[in-house]
Amino acid sequence: MRVRVAALIIAILTTLSVAVAAPARADTGSLGAGSADLFSPSSIFLWQSPPTRYIVVLGAKMGTFGQTPAILEQRMNVAANLALSHPFNRMIVSGGNTWWLPVSEAQFMNVGLLRRGVPVWQMINEAASTSTVANATNTVAMLKHMGATGALIVTNGFHMGRALNDFRTAARKQHARLEFRPAYA
């Protein structure tokens, strides 16, 4: 219990120092549940146990020549704001096949998140999935292996219901005790 309280205090102080010292970002992402605001439900969820709570960003089909679709830009904006506000929480970037391109969606998102200031050590790739069901199955296995207790799922509103259902179903099938919360892009 003392470790969690100490981790929470460190996370709050770090977040406050990042918020004060960091230059203002033009795009602050969602102001709803995906927000990285100090006392938002997403932030409180992540602060409860930084080493065991993850941020999961779902990929989206890339353009034929590697163009990033607008929905993926929105997801990366929200994910970057969360990651920068919660430097002790790791992020799983999930997305596989990009047709004929030689890199995965996760690798494209790595570049986009690096450009937004997220350090590479904070990101973990899940690059084998080709659908939301596969995102959920593969990511739940990773979370279970890493001893996670829960994760924020970053995706767009039209996709959130299905994504949360797929993640909760995958957790039940794998007997993983994980809590999933939405972070809307």
Image: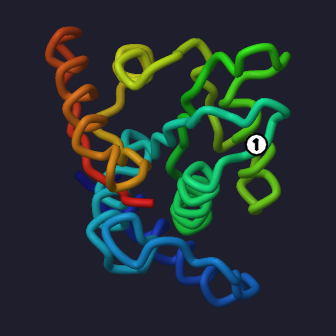
Whole-percent x and y of residue 8?
A: 37, 64
Whole-percent x and y of residue 24?
A: 70, 87
Viewer-proximal residue among 117 and 49: 117
Name the quarter where the C terminus is drawn. Answer: bottom left
Viewer-proximal residue among 148 and 57: 57
57 sits to left or right of 72: left
Whole-percent x and y of residue 29?
A: 53, 72
Whole-percent x and y of residue 49?
A: 34, 50
Residue 114 shows in this picture: yes
Amino acid residing under circle 1: Val
Task: Please tell me how many numbered marks the rendered image carries.
Answer: 1
For this orientation, the residue located farthest to the front is: 64
Residue at 81 percent across and 35 percent down: it is: 66
Quadrant assignment, res 4: bottom left
Crowd class of label 1 (few under 14; some 14 to 19; many from 20; radius 10 Å): few
Residue 143 shows in this picture: no
63 sits to left or right of 146: right
Q: Is residue 45 above or below residue 177?
A: below
The local secondary structure at tag 1 comes to helix
Q: Is residue 6 above or below residue 125?
A: below
Residue under numbered circle 1? 120
22 sits to left or right of 3: right
Residue at 64 percent across and 90 percent down: it is: 20
74 sits to left or right of 119: left
Residue at 29 percent across and 58 percent down: it is: 45
Viewer-proximal residue among 61 and 118: 61
Residue at 85 percent across and 33 percent down: it is: 65
